[in-house]
Amino acid sequence: MTDRTSPPGPVRAPAREGQFTHLRLDKVSRRFGDKLVLDGLDLRIAGGEFVALLGPSGCGKSTALNCLAGLLPLSGGGIWLDERRVDTLPPERRGFGMVFQNYALFPHMSVRRNVGFGLRMRGIARQEARARVDEALRLVQLAPYADRLPGQLSGGQQQRVAIARAIVIEPPLVLMDEPLSNLDAALRLDMRTEIRRLHQSLGLTTVYVTHDQEEALSLADRLVVLREGVVQQVGTPEELYRSPANPYVAGFMGYRNLFAMTVTGGEGGHATARGLGIELTGVAGEGVGSGPATVAIRPEDFLVGEPPADAENVIEVGVEVVEYHGRELAVQARLPEGQALRLRTSTRVERGETVRVWVPKDRVLIFADATAISPQPGPPQSGAPDATGSGQETAAEASAS
Amino acid sequence: MTPVTSASTSPAPNPPAPTAERSGGTGRPALSHRLAERGIDRTLLLLLPGLVFLILLFIYPFVYGLGLSFQPMHGSGALYNYQKFFSDPYERDTIWITLKIGLPAALINVLASVPIAYRLRGRVRGKRALTTALVIPITLGTVLTAIGMIEYFSGTGWLNKILIALHITDIDHPVPLLHNYWGVMLSLLVSGFPFAFLLTLSYLSGIDPSLESAAATLGAGWWQRFRDIVFPLLAPGLAMTFCLNFVLAFSVFPSAVLLGDPERSTHVISIAAYDAAYQEYDYSKASAIAMVMAAVMLIVISIVLFARGRLYRGSSGGKG
Ligand SMILES: Nc1ncnc2c1ncn2[C@@H]1O[C@H](COP(=O)(O)OP(=O)(O)O)[C@@H](O)[C@H]1O
Ligand SMILES: [Mg+2]
């Protein structure tokens, strides 16, 4: 985008006033009726950091964000900005900027008045407010649209107005609730870059909620994976991608093959598991002994064809569905006992064919947790569309991959 | 099959199929498609019952009454009834009397319903019970309400008993709330408020709640959220609510008779029309008064709707 000329890497603006060093969520809980939607969320966010909350629809991401913003009272725990407790303040006194999934632009106000609303509420002098609004609109490349009503803008433009409106007040914390999920595929990629660019140039601490792991991986400095209101893992995109803590996180990080098998042996950090008519050796996770386990493999880690002599984990599968994805094929095959297996390959295979596939044992993860097979893994190949994401998922991922 | 379609789609048996297609498709889409483009299709039939209803029960009586009003029973000239009405202060003043009751009543109902509906807009405990309680006066009808009010507001009614017990007033000087302006006003508030409240509540629920959340995160307190977001989006609905309430109040009749002072301070225009029709048996004059009544309502509504036209009236982002 426009920062092509600026040096690569995260260039952070110096910390501005009103910035904090740490935002601390301390056992934040929220229940609806007797349902615990958020269960003791502990999190420490450094000033200037970009944190993504990742999880499937209904796992409590929006609830967490609304609790942070002050739109929902907590049922337990506390939120601290450095040494100041903020969870007892109403939203208007917290001063966090929020970008909503449905934009929530004021339909009766022009773009300029929408963006200027927060400044007006803060009693900023008219002249300064105008200059800051113009600057914010320039930043999101909407200066020519300042006098339009939101209803006259496209979805992407509306979302840019929403972002400008949230950042123009220079909030200590920006909250974004699936801001891209209502946009079409190409626009989503553009806006993603734009959000990253804004974060790099303004250095605003951001908490970003999404169900799309690709979005989370590409935007965030740190990821928090949630499942039914419980944190599963916190780490950098690389940590999560390399070594997911459990099958659930693995499912989110693209390990779309999650097999329930039984560990029969192992040595030197590796374990061997049997079941489903196959035998696989892989990296043993924490606590893997003998007994039930989950084996996780990424579709793109399979190799197809005539295996070399030293090939590990060779299995024979029947090809069932072949999808053409340009550079490669997405294949669904069956293990001997009928379990589905997904793989991606550039080798030509045909439906009905029986092929031999293998996978290096360092690319296979074995988890002691045998119960936690994700019902909804959401990796790029086909994803599990979020209930809110409608049909745009497939198109988005096709173009993204 | 109708003759038209069979003629155009079944060619002579001789020519081969391609020719038939060409002669059938003259490059113009079928008539039904062209009509559908202009919104003319069979679903228009759904409007028929409404249209018949409108003509039989509204337009016909209106036109008939209008005609009748120009054929005075007494006097001469088509406009005699109107001249008479406007030259007789007793009759002419019914317009002001009715406006003086109707406009404030509608305004108070709308203004009172806004804060209550605003407070109850989301999920609130007991909202359904309250809504039900407010619908009851509507279902009971004006006459029953009026009788209840006589019990309550009369010189020996509960209200005055309480006031006397509290020594706010004494038995010889009960607060006069019946058979005067205030009696009619109170009855219009009792019967009009639930109506205004329910309408306002439904207009409010059409406003996307995330707009208020957004305003809150931008630093707006509840009053600013109401003033800058909710009220501007609600205003067109309030204008509509006001109009409906005004129309109801302007044609007030039973409570003006039962609770008011129908000869003097609450001699409203509908009473004038009633008297003309059933005391004087002058239907022509009654029609003329009814026409004046319609004209006044139309003028007030036009002013309100004209003002409403200057407001933002697009989507309010909600379910509505
Ligand atoms: N106002 C509410 N009342 C009752 N349950 C709710 C409410 N809001 C959310 N929930 C429940 O809380 C869970 C988490 O919701 P949410 O935070 O919106 O999930 P996400 O944003 O991750 O999709 C869901 O199961 C949802 O049904
Ligand atoms: Mg959500």
Image: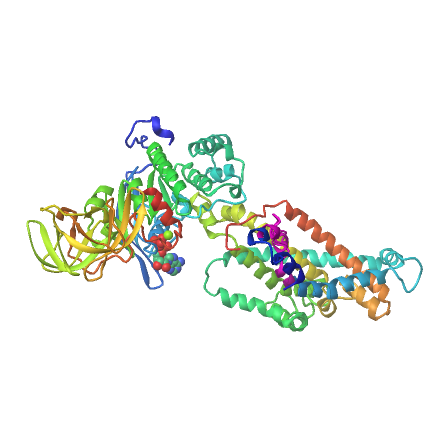
Is residue A25 at least partly visible in the picture?
A: no
Q: Residue at x 15, y 57 (%)?
A: A368
* Magenta span contains residue B33: yes
Q: Residue furthest left?
A: A267
Color scheme of the displayed model: rainbow
Q: Residue at x 32, y 30 (%)?
A: A13
Left/right placement of residue A359 relative to residue B66 reads left
Q: Residue furthest front?
A: B14
> Between B157 and A41, which is closer to the camera in this rendering?
A41
Q: Give the x, y percent position of residue B19.
A: 58, 51
Give above or below for B99 relative to A224: below
> Between A61 and B8, which is closer to the camera in this rendering?
B8
Q: Give the x, y percent position of residue A16.
A: 34, 32
What's the magenta region? B21-46
Q: Quadrant of the C terminus of chain A?
A: top left
Q: Residue at x 86, y 64 (%)?
A: B284
Is residue A38 at least partly visible in the picture?
A: yes
Q: Give the x, y percent position of residue A92.
A: 42, 45
Q: Give the x, y percent position of residue A110.
A: 53, 39
Magenta stretch mostly in which secondary structure? helix
Left/right placement of residue A77 relative to residue B41 reads left
Give above or below for B251 relative to A142: below
* Magenta span contains residue A172: no
